[in-house]
Image: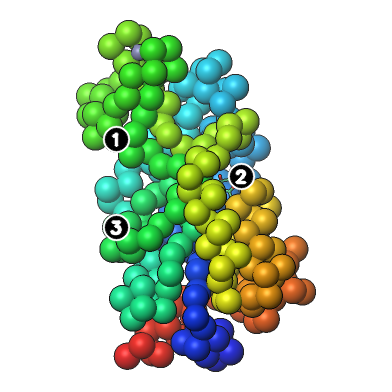
Amino acid sequence: MKKLIEAVLNAKRTVALTGAGVSTLSGIPDFRGPQGMYRNPEAEKIFDIDWFDRDPGVYYRGCRELVYGFEKFRPGPVHLALKQLEDAGRLAGIATQNIDMLHQKAGSSNVWELHGSPLWHHCRICGKSATFEQVCSQLKAGAEVARCVCGGALKPDITFFGEMLPEEALIAAQSAAIGADVMMVLGTSLTVFPAAGLPNLTLQAGGKVFIVNAQPTALDRYAAGRYPDLREFAEAVKNALA
Ligand code: APR
Ligand code: ZN
């Protein structure tokens, strides 16, 4: 981990790409890890737009705890370590694939949410918006699916399979990746594009990529450093900034 820390402390511009692995330390399951959500083949339907329009209950049943129970989850050691790096002026921003808003809860200010977030929902019939809180209160009152006054299902502004990514976040993250001399890839299997293509932009622009992930990834052989444990990463950052 020493090589990663030294690179970050001496870099002109470091960015991070985070995935579900960083939130497993907060108690939120990842997708493809050994305890991941996708062990249940049905789970892939949860974030599929065709399934949502066929039966929004597939999403709402699958995410009742995971998404609408977010307020009980706290930022984990990696979220806090990235906030510390930002406070120390050693992190320009975080491109995250996560929808749990834990980077913001940790106080990070430059977060590009590549797969959107459930902060806002929109009606699939009339497009009317609803807040995360409004949806949570419908669910708490016993609704199986949160609905608009017109009866349409309320869909979170999370990027479902079959949908385009939020353009603004993607463009900001791509330019940050090109401009970075160091990218830390933290807790992602690097299997879902275009997010998984960001480290290549840093490499192609001459930057270095460091990967911290328990399972192997397709970019391991191009990494300047590759480590298996996110807790160890967070510990190393804390000690380096102490
Ligand atoms: N230390 C190191 N690595 C860990 C830890 C840990 N404590 N916990 C989990 N990981 C690793 C897992 O080994 C796994 O390779 O984090 C990785 C998480 O990978 P995925 O579950 O595939 O999550 P992610 O890469 O974020 O998925 C990308 O897929 O389903 C879609 O839109 C969803 O944003 C998600 C996207
Ligand atoms: Zn409506």
Does the beta carbon at disc 3 come under 8 Å from ligand 1?
A: no
Quarter of the C terminus within the rendering: bottom left
Q: What's under tag 2, amino acid-wise?
A: Tyr
Instruction: Please give the label number shown on residue 38.
Output: 2
Determine the CA span between mark 2 and mark 3: 26 Å
Quarter of the N terminus within the rendering: bottom right
The answer to whether any part of residue 125 appears in the image is yes
Residue 120 x, y percent position in the rendering: 34, 34
Left of 30 or right of it: where is 103?
left
Sooner in the amino-acid sequence: mark 2 or mark 3:
2
SS for callout 3:
helix
Pointers 1 and 3 in contact (CB under 8 A)? no
Does the beta carbon at disc 1 come under 8 Å from ligand 2?
A: no
Determine the CA span between mark 1 and mark 2: 25 Å
Mark 2 Cα-neighbour bin, 10 Å: few <14, some 14–19, many ≥20: some
Ligand 2, by image quadrant, is: top left
SS for callout 2:
helix
Residue 201 vs 168, above or below: the answer is below
Q: Which residue is mark 1?
A: 132
Residue 208 figure quarter: bottom right
Mark 1 Cα-neighbour bin, 10 Å: few <14, some 14–19, many ≥20: some
| Colour setup of the view | rainbow
Q: How many marks?
A: 3
From the viewer's side, name the closer residue of 141 and 242.
242
Instruction: Please give the label number shown on residue 25.
Output: none
From the viewer's side, name the closer residue of 133 and 13.
13
